[in-house]
Amino acid sequence: MAALTSVSAGSTTASLQHRFHCVSYSSPKELCVTFGLATTVKRRFSLSYRSTLTIRSAATKPAKSPAEEDWSTKRAYLLEKRVRSVEPKEALRLQKENNFVILDVRPEAEFKEAHPEGAINVQIYRLIKEWTAWDIARRAAFAFFGIFSGTEENPEFLQIVESKLNKDEKIIVACSSGGTMKPTQNLPEGQQSRSLIAAYLLVLNGYTNIFHLEGGIYNWFKQELPAASEE
């Protein structure tokens, strides 16, 4: 297991009753757990205060990958390269009439359950596979929040895509929700998604005809467009 470099917390010599209050999570290297404490003092009065327990893992995070760039950076590059979003019905027309390929970047299990007819699958994220100190720390962080199937960026994503699709291929990248580059009042820079991250990586690596499925595969199914499964 990953070593812990430090554990710090407020303390008292009086008897304590801990009531779990909240958890804040800034990175897999550091978990901050805040407890509401009711401290009973012998003179029969209570003093309430807050204490924060910080656990730092000794594991070192690898350098930031392109997929981890700020969304504002990715969005600006996608717009600069004129990556266009298309609605599901337009995507279907482009697939049928202009030989566009739908690249489904969801996890393999989701793809097998149901996907747009004719789509190919290369997952951009996969279940955590390695057992380095960093990966163990990440597993522990996910497990802390009750998530026992944590994911990581698929390091073979680009390699697999390149084995299946040429760099001048016309590709519509799709994921579950789709995300959007369109600004709204609440989201002035749109909303990031797995398909937009994948589109960014592809354009960054020389793909020249990248499109994005607006509304995602959820809207494809909602509009009852052709679908297939492998189960």
Image (cartoon, rainbow, N blue to C red):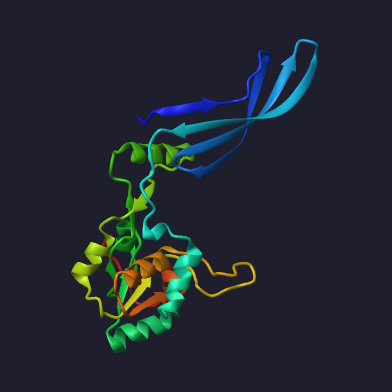
Height in image: 154 above or below 167?
A: above
Q: How many marks?
A: 0
Q: Which residue is drawn at 30% across and 89% down?
A: 97
Q: Residue 158: x, y in percent? A: 27, 64
Residue sitting nearer the eye, 145 or 185: 185
Residue sitting nearer the eye, 70 or 113: 70
For this orientation, the residue located farthest to the front is 63
Q: Residue at x 76, y 22 (%)?
A: 47
For this orientation, the residue located farthest to the bottom is 97
**Viewport quadrant of the C terminus:** bottom left
Residue sitting nearer the eye, 113 or 146: 146
User: Quadrant location of residue 175?
Assistant: bottom left
Is residue 216 in view? Answer: yes
Q: Which residue is drawn at 20% across and 70% down?
A: 164
Q: Residue at x 37, y 31 (%)?
A: 2
State left or right for residue 114 relative to residue 87.
left
For this orientation, the residue located farthest to the top is 42
**Viewport quadrant of the N terminus:** top left
Q: Residue 102: x, y in percent? A: 32, 75
State left or right for residue 97 relative to residue 193.
left
Q: Residue 114: x, y in percent? A: 34, 65
Q: Residue 39: x, y in percent? A: 71, 20
Height in image: 192 above or below 167?
A: above
Is residue 178 in view? Answer: no
User: Quadrant location of residue 68?
Assistant: bottom left
State left or right for residue 132 relative to residue 181.
left
Height in image: 169 above or below 142?
A: below
For this orientation, the residue located farthest to the left is 163
